Image (spheres, rainbow, N blue to C red):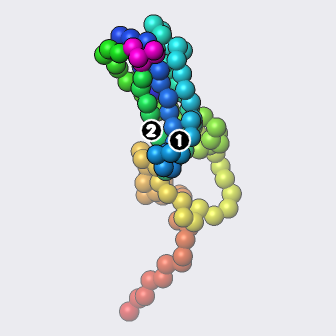
Amino acid sequence: MSLIGSDFHTLLSIYTVTALNALTVIVRDDDSGPNATGEASFAATAGTTFSLAVDGYDSDSGDRKLNFALTADATGPANDHFAAATLLTGSTANAARETGEPARAAFPACREFGPPRHTVRP
């Protein structure tokens, strides 16, 4: 997140909040961005609510611009995405398909795993 593009000396703070009197600072920044603007990176955890504060240094004020970008976790395993798949052994029970991943029918040589299917013939 950053306040780059704001026209005053900004302060940026990101917190987790469990109660109004229980703020936990995740990151604070004063001047990492150009022209004395706040800029900060942090690892967000799924399911966690983050709050942010945008302030002016020494009560400075003006037009503010909030920028943010989400990036994928770079610490995942090398074969985490379908495009970088590697051969695994074992069961695929409870496996989920990713967005954009071809349906299994596109690979007729692949075997479906899961409970056995039975056909009743007359």
Image position of 39 with respect to 119: above or below: above
- Report which quarter residue 56 is drawn in: top left
Marks 2 and 1, how far apart at CA: 9 Å
Q: Which mark is residue 23?
A: 1
Task: Out of 118 and 49, give the one closest to the viewer.
Answer: 49
Q: Which mark is residue 51?
A: 2
Question: Mark 1: which amino acid?
Answer: Leu
Element type at mark 2: strand
Task: Out of 1 and 25, give the one closest to the viewer.
Answer: 25
Element type at mark 1: strand
Q: Are marks 2 and 1 in contact (CB under 8 Å)?
A: yes
Task: Out of 102 and 47, give the one closest to the viewer.
Answer: 47
Give the quarter of the figure containing the C terminus: bottom left
Residue 45 on image: x %, y %: 54, 44
Q: Is residue 111 left or right of residue 119?
A: right
- Image: magenta residue range: 56-60
Image position of 41 with respect to 32: above or below: below
Residue 10 on image: x %, y %: 44, 17
- What secondary structure characterizes most of the magenta part? helix
View extreme (bottom): residue: 122
